[in-house]
Structures are given as structure tokens and as C-alpha cells.
Amino acid sequence: MTPPGSDARTAFDVADRLHLLEPWEVFGERARRYEIHLVGRSTELVRGPLELEGYGIRVFRPRDEGLGIGFQSSTEVSEDGIRTAAADAENLAPRSQFPAKKIDLPGSPAGNGGTVEMCDPKLWDRPMEAVQEFAEALLAPLDGRADVVPSFGSVRATLLETTLANSAGLRASFRHTLIELEFAVRAVGGPEGRPPGEYWINETSRRLAPERALPLIEEMERHARAVREAVPSPTGELPVVLPAPVLSTILPQVIGRRCSGIARLRQMAPEPGTAWGSDLLTLRDEGRWPWGIGSAPVDDEGTPHRRRTILERGKVSELLYDLPHAGAFDTRSTGNGLRGRGTIYLDWRRFLHPPTIASTTLFVEPGSGGSDAELVEAAGDGVWVQQFGSAVPDPLSGAFGGEIRIGYRIRHGKIAEPIRGGTVGGLVVAPPGQRSLIANVAAVGNSPQLCEAIVTPALLIRPLTVAGAS
Amino acid sequence: MSDLRNSEADFSRALARLEEHTPFAEILAQAERGEGVRLDRRSLTASQTPRLKGAVLRAWGGERWIEGATSSLEGPSIVHAADAVLQQLSKSTVKSPPPGEASTLRREWTERPARPVSEVGVEEMIALARDVLAWEASVPGVTEGVVSLNWNDEERFYLNTAGARAYQLLCRVGGFVTPIAVENGRVEFDYVSLGSLGGWDRFGVLTEASVTEVAREARQLLDARPPPTGAMSVLLDPGTAGTFAHESFGHGTEADQFLRDRSYLRPILGQEVSPEMLSIVDDGTHPDGWGTIRFDDEGRATQRTMLIDHGRFVGALHDRGTAAALHARPTGNARRSDFLSRLFVRMTNTYVEPGDRTFEELVEEAKNGVVLEHTTSGIEDPLGGQMQIKVKKGRRIENGQLTDPVTSMALSGKVLDVLRQMRGASRRADFQMTPGFCGKGHTDILPVGSGGVYLLSTAVVGPG
């Protein structure tokens, strides 16, 4: 499982010095971070390497009818530091209680687990140079331009060496890279006093792709110009097309939680076999999908990833589990115990967090809705949302919604004028027979795109509530 | 608790090393200790704040800032980190704006609350959490609930080569109580939150009356209708008004956005932007603030900064660099989310000052519209001048009367339009400060306070 050259031993070294009763696990990570911050065409600040090595120890102790689970994380790798962190975890276990009768820790998988593409080799070998080259690639298409200029941005690249060890004999390690890109371009000039238009992206990926810079900037330029032309959004119950970058901020956060052991434990999960989605919609969890930010050979508890079907033609097929929730339901972990995954933010310092259940890479099976243009044609009279301020889905109630930062009116099956302001929202999931984003999918496109933790084509939802000023 | 001041000699050695090669250098060290409990009907988790501490070293190389960080506070590691920073000096070709005036603050803030939660212990926190969960459960139809309580003692120790030596111990207490109602697959919840500097007494807001009231509201949301949609009168509750202040005139007045030419507000500094009844403040010294700090991460004492004074846009938030570039004075708003994160101009506690109306008067004046209650998030648009605020629930206003409850909403609007259409702020008795977490864009999260009173204006609202 370890790619050639990886020499990380954080969790192994900690495990070798632990004197704990079984069962226990150690998640270790060694990280180097490189950052470049831009203002206009200038470099504002270069940082790095920022080096951080740490680990999280988790112990499982019988308590009443269940388990007491204790967790502590630390950057102190000395003998004393490890002893203190282990004692913390041990002391917390009897103060905690979880309704699992057992915990089945995974042992080392047979073979090397195969290769999952998640480590950018150029970034790994020449991190600061690679970050600078990528920043230059972003700026290059805007050289000499007076009508569209770089506004600000940052490229923050983290090189991670993850190690896992547990009392069942697991010893696993892998390298991976994470890139947080924030970049904004501004359309300026033209008639006197006309306000500028900015298009601002925030995205996390696994590799720097300088060849992607030119098309990315061209697309950003188009939307920045559209901001200047935009008119208020309409109001009504309208067909809405949501492309992959928008869906990446909505679906994983809600599906990963509501279709999980966490929700089942609290009687909020859909029953397998019930139809919560449109029969056009099939959702899978693909933990080994190349370059997905949630992809890896194993999850953060050491369980190997394999394909899971969450929704099959709209019907709930399988729920997602980590080790403790699998223990609570006498089933097996699905490899969805992940660390550092909040509703909005991904924390690169993953060892600070105990695992929780999340989807790894959510895959929306392409449909027969055709290209984006064909989805727009099918919408007829509606709205294309290019970017929300923030959709901020609520995993509990399933509600989502946000301000349209930039979108496009769809008229007579064609993209028409840009729109801005107003909101689009509703429920992502709702019980059978009720309206929701996944129940009202009217067409699924045929061109899936990887965006952070999802691979999906654009979806046509008919209808969603659009609240505009017009 | 280990005291960062015990490492002062090592920090001084590292600073001396940096000073040999640079005109100015500073070190900010950070350490935290804390505990938390999370209780629901199925599980209990007791946790401790990660054992994470470290320091960031920053030097002005004459033309640029250079910086590095270490998570080890052992003497050799700090000096090694200083050497690593100096290595960057020769490699970097970045040119930064002049650094401005350095802090010379020499002061220590070591006050602890009368009854620190750290001395009360996790068992009492668990006992309180069990009481709160039982109060939630006493409300028919509330089938689930989550109670999270925590304390966190954070030290920050700042030293520089201009002579500053500043130390602060910040004892924070936080809590989040979420009664959940589930019926036929539909899930709704409401919440009570608390967060500020202080001790055990801060948990006093979690009474049987306050918890059962919010639990009843959670149950009621199962029967609530979706909100009305479109442009209408919006009456923001005190927490939502605080989020409005934060997203509208907070982010847009962070002066690094001025230097990026990325604030639509910069050209209108000094102008009237709203009716006279509106004043907005950022105040790092507020006694009830979740974002209260004694000094910022450039060693500058925090202060109260007027942003809008009776309708006039009068001030911006600065670090030393933006202050130097814009001929202003630093306002104590230079913050890092931790020693691994870069420094930005950030808010502390941002709030709307009280007005002179009553809530009932504002409802009557709204005539038709919606009250937005229990804010859940917001996001700014510093250049475009838009803003988004989301709330958990609300109530319709029809013919000047409060009527039906409605489910979660998103508000959208152009900040200047919303300001111009302000029609009233309620009295001091309604003032509340609420805790939150703020990102600069989508990263660099840190604690902030937001507050205010009921505020009446017009905006677009829809489900969210």
C-alpha cells in the first residue's frame, strides 16, 4: 500500500511505544505545507515549509452495555508525550459511552491494497517550485490584460504521509497531496463608473494541474463579465440546472450523513428499499476514485475502500458505516470513517480529529439527459445556478439554499441573460412522496466531472424555489 | 497548564538570531487546553482539546515578510525554526508593502474567572448535559437532542525585537444545545448557543425554561410552512442582526480588502450609508464577546472601532501594514487562526448598537414580511456588495401582526440597499451577543462575536 519512497512511521513509532490494553488504534500524519498568496499580479506572501507531525490515539473499553471510546491527539512524539496522550485517551474512555457491543478493528489487508491516484508526483518532488509554477500558470492568461485582471488568491499545498496502526496488527501507510485553491478574477473598465465584476472560486483538489489553468481562467473571465451584466433573479417554482461545482457543496454533506449509521442510530436514516430519490438517480460511494479528495486505499480507520451503492434508481440501497456504528448494528464498516471533514471545511490537520462517517467520493451515475446544452433545452424556462454564496446544507433537516452569486436565466431552452442575487433553496432529502432535490431530479447529464468529493454530471431539478427581486 | 512564558529565554534567543539579519522580528506562541462533552440519547463523548502548541516566527527582511512555524517549543527547535526563516530570506523575491509601526506593548493578562470550568471538572459538565437533555426530552415530540458543552483555555505570548512582551490567557466557555424533532422521516431542530470568555456561571443561560422553550420551538417547526419568497420586510433578530453587521460592514471594512482594491466600501468611506438610527461597531474588548482578545497577533491592544456612526461610514479595521499604507492607525485586528495560519485583518466582536424602538413597534411597521430568527451562517461579497444570511426559522408578519412560524430561510441582498432601507432598531434591553466562527473566505477559521438588537429593513428571502 505504501508508494515507493515513503518512510513515514509516525503511527508505527507511537504504536511501538504504547502500553495499552487492546483494542486501540493510532492514526499518524506528517505534513508539510507550502503556500503562496497573491494580490493582483504580485506575490504577497510565501510560506513554507510549515511542518507538522502528530497522531491521534483511540481506545475502546467495555462500559455498561456498550463501549467507552477515548480519543486524544498530540504533536508530542517524545516518550513522555505519547504516554500523556495515551493516558488522556484512557481517562476519557470511562467517561464516554457508545452503544456498540464490540469493535472489529481491521487487520492489514492482503497484498499492497493497490494504487489509488491521490499524490501529485511533481508537487511531491518540488513542492515550492510546483506551487509557484501553478500560480504563474493562473496569472499567465491575464498578462497584459486591462479588461480582466487577477484580483487575489492563494495556493496552499499540503504533502501528507498518513500512517495507521492498531492492536489487530494493521500497519498501513500512504502518501497524498491536498491543494486548496482560492482565486478571483475581476472584469473592469468599460463605460464610466461601471462597477467591476468578480468571480471567486474556492476549491480543494489532490493535484496541481497547470494545463487546467487556461480553461479555468477563460471560464472565470466569462462569469466575471457576466456579473457586470447580471439582472435580478426571477421568483417562482422553476426548473433549475445545478452543475458539478454547485452539487459538490450540497450532496456529499447531506447524503454522507443522512444515509449513514449516525442517522440510523437516531432513527433519521431512510429505510433501505424506500424510494427517496428520482428513479433517474443512482448514487455510489467510490473510495478509490482517482484524485477524489476523499479517496484513499483505506479509510481513516484502516478499512479498505470498495464501491458502495447508496441509491439505486432512487431507492435506498446501503447505508454508510464507520467502525463504532458498524459495531452498534452488528454489521461491517463500509470504509467511511473519515477525519477532518466538516460540513463546509476540510481540515488538513486530520490527526486532530476522531473519525466520523462521511461519503468518500460520491459518484452520480451519468444519465440520458445529454450534454449541458441538452439539459438547458430540457429546462425550457428556468435558471442555471453557476455559483452560490454558499449553499451550506444542513445534514440534519436536509435544508439547503443560498444566494445566487452568478447564474443564468434559461429562456426557450437556451442560456439567456446572467442573473445575480436572490436565493434558490429547498430540501436535499425528504421522505417518499415529498418534494426534495433528489426526488425532483428530472434529468441527469452525461458528462460527469470530479469536483472535490463528488463526481457528477449536471442535474436538472424540476422545480426548486427561486426567490428573486424581480 | 504549561505556561508559554517559561520558554521566554528560548524565544528571546531565536529573536536575537533573527535580529542579527533582519530589522524586525516577532514570535507568537500559542498553547491550548480544554475539555468538552457531547451527549445525545444514544451516546456520550468526553474529549480533550488536542495537545497542540507551537509558535510562528515572522521577520521583516527589509523588502518582505518571511515566516515559519514550529510545533515544538523545545529550545533547539525554536532556534532551528529561526534559522529556517532566515534561509527563506535569501530565496524569496517577494516584495511586500512597508510593515508600519511595531507594537511595544508590555503587559500580561492572566485573569481567570471566579469559577473556571477547568476546576469544576468534566463530571459536572456531564451532569449538566444530562439535565439539559432531560429538559429537552420532557417536551412531547422531541425525540432526539444533542448537548455540547466545552471550555478552552488559550495562551498567546507575543514578543518582538522592538521590545514588546505581551501575554494573554483567554478562558472561553461554549455550549450548543439542539433539540431535534423527527416525524415520518422529516427532521427539524432548533438551538440555544452560548460562547464567551468566562467560567462556569456562563452555563447559567441553560435553564429548564430556556431549554424547554427551544425544544417546543423545534417540535413546532415540524408543522411550520416554508417561508414566503421574494422581496419583503425583514425583521432580523439580535443574532441575525449581528451576522448582518459582520457580513455587511465587517468583511468589507477589513482594510486588507481595501489594499486588494476589493472593497466596494472604500470609495464611500466618510459618506452616509444608512439612516441615522444605525451604528455598527467592532469591539475586541467586549466583556461578553466570543471574539474578545486582549491584544492581536501583532501585539497591539484591542479596541472599540466605530464602523458606522449614526448612519455615516467612519472607520475600517487595520493591521499595522494596512494602517501604514492607508495613513491610519492599527486597530488591533491582526489575527491568525492559529500558529500555523497566516495573519489577516479580521473582526473580533461586531455588533449593531441599540436603537429606540420596541419589537412590537417594528412588527407593526413591517406590516407584511417575516422575522428571521436563529442565524446559522452568513457569507460576504466584499467587492460585489452582496450578502447572504441563513437562519433556522422565522415567523410571518401579516397586517402588522406576528402569525405562523416558518422553516429555515436564506436572505439575499445588496448591502447598501438593505442599509438604506433600514427602518428601525430596537432598544438596549433586546441586545444579545452570540458566538460564531468566521473564515477569511473559506479558510482560516477563528472565534468571533456578533450581536445586536432587532433590526427592520427590506431584502429578498427564500427557503434555505
Image (spheres, grey):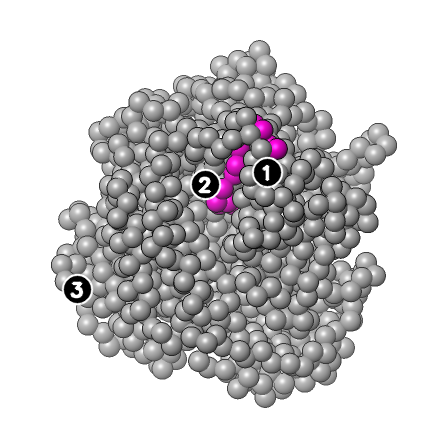
Magenta stretch in the rendered image = B365-377
Question: In the displayed structure, would residue A425 be above or below residue A205?
Answer: above
Residue depicted at x 38% and y 58% = B206
Q: Chain of mark 1?
A: B
- Amino acid carrying mark 2 in the image: Lys
Density class for disc 3 (Cα within 10 Å; few <14, some 14-19, many ≥20) is some
Residue B283 appears in the picture as rendered: yes
For the residues beneath circles 1 and 3, the answer to whether they share a chain is no
Q: Badge 2 is on which residue?
A: B392
- Amino acid carrying mark 3 in the image: Arg
Q: Chain of mark 3?
A: A
User: Of A340 and B114, which appears nearest the observer?
Assistant: B114
Residue depicted at x 23% and y 46% = A265
How far is mark 1 from mark 3, CA to CA?
56 Å
- Whichever of callouts 2 and 1 sits on the residue coming sooner in the sequence is 1
Residue depicted at x 39% and y 44% = B190
Q: Badge 3 is on which residue?
A: A63
The residue most toward the bottom is B9
- Quarter assignment of residue B63: bottom right
The residue most toward the top is A412
- Magenta span contains residue B124: no
Residue A126 appears in the picture as rendered: no
> Which disc is residue B361 wearing?
1
Element class at badge 3: strand
Density class for disc 1 (Cα within 10 Å; few <14, some 14-19, many ≥20) is few
User: Is A454 situated left or right of B247 in this image?
Assistant: left
- Amino acid carrying mark 1 in the image: Glu
Density class for disc 2 (Cα within 10 Å; few <14, some 14-19, many ≥20) is many
- Magenta span contains residue B368: yes
Q: Percent position (x, y) of residue A445? A: 45, 23
